[in-house]
Amino acid sequence: MDDYIDRQAAIDACFDGWNNSADDCARNIKSLPAADVAPVVHGHWIPYRCDMYECSVCKRIHTSMDVEGCDAEYCPHCGAKMDGEGEE
């Protein structure tokens, strides 16, 4: 898995002195801590019945009250981003 680092921290690591070489810059960037990130899971709401909706990722059924009229940006149970990019 790739390591993710803060962009500004990488820039700062390259310019911590006046005359950093490319090797100094690379060494400084490699010493930065990796960020704690998780991949974004995308999904969409599937109409179930009446005002109920199913999450395309976790398959849990939600009422419109659970998901604010199905305008919720994220599934309240699995955390999937409901932007429709995960459609089959």
Image (cartoon, rainbow, N blue to C red):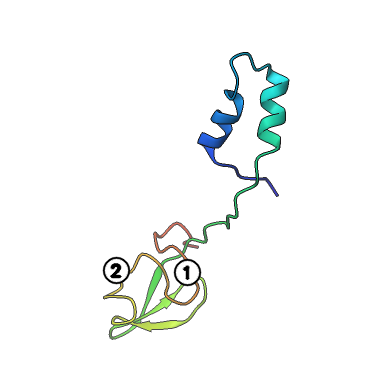
The residue lying furthest to the front in this view is 17
Q: Is 14 located above or below residue 40 in the figure?
A: above
Q: Quadrant of residue 18?
A: top right
Q: Is residue 28 left or right of residue 80?
A: right
Q: Position of residue 11 (x, y in %)?
A: 55, 29
Residue 88 or residue 31, whichever sits in front: 31
Q: Is 23 located above or below residue 48 in the figure?
A: above
The residue lying furthest to the top in this view is 19
Mark 1–mark 2 Cα distance, whole angstroms, equals 14 Å
Element carrying mark 2: loop
Residue at x 47%, y 81% (from the top left corner): 60
Residue 32 or residue 83, whichever sits in front: 32
Mark 1 = which residue?
79
- The amino acid pointed to by label 1 is Gly
- The amino acid pointed to by label 2 is Asp
Mark 2: few/some/many CA within 10 Å (<14, 14-19, 20+): few
Residue 31 or residue 57, whichever sits in front: 31
Mark 1: few/some/many CA within 10 Å (<14, 14-19, 20+): some
In this rendering, the count of numbered labels is: 2
Q: Is residue 23 left or right of residue 69?
A: right
Mark 2 = which residue?
71
Label pair 1/2, CB-CB below 8 angstroms: no
Q: Is 80 located above or below residue 58 in the figure?
A: above
Q: Position of residue 41 (x, y in %)?
A: 52, 61
Mark toward the viewer: 1 or 2: 1
Q: Quadrant of residue 69?
A: bottom left
Q: Is residue 82 left or right of residue 5?
A: left
Residue at x 51%, y 71% (from the top left corner): 57
Residue 3 or residue 52, whichever sits in front: 3
Q: Quadrant of residue 29?
A: top right
Residue at x 50%, y 63% (from the top left corner): 88
Q: Position of residue 21 (x, y in %)?
A: 68, 16
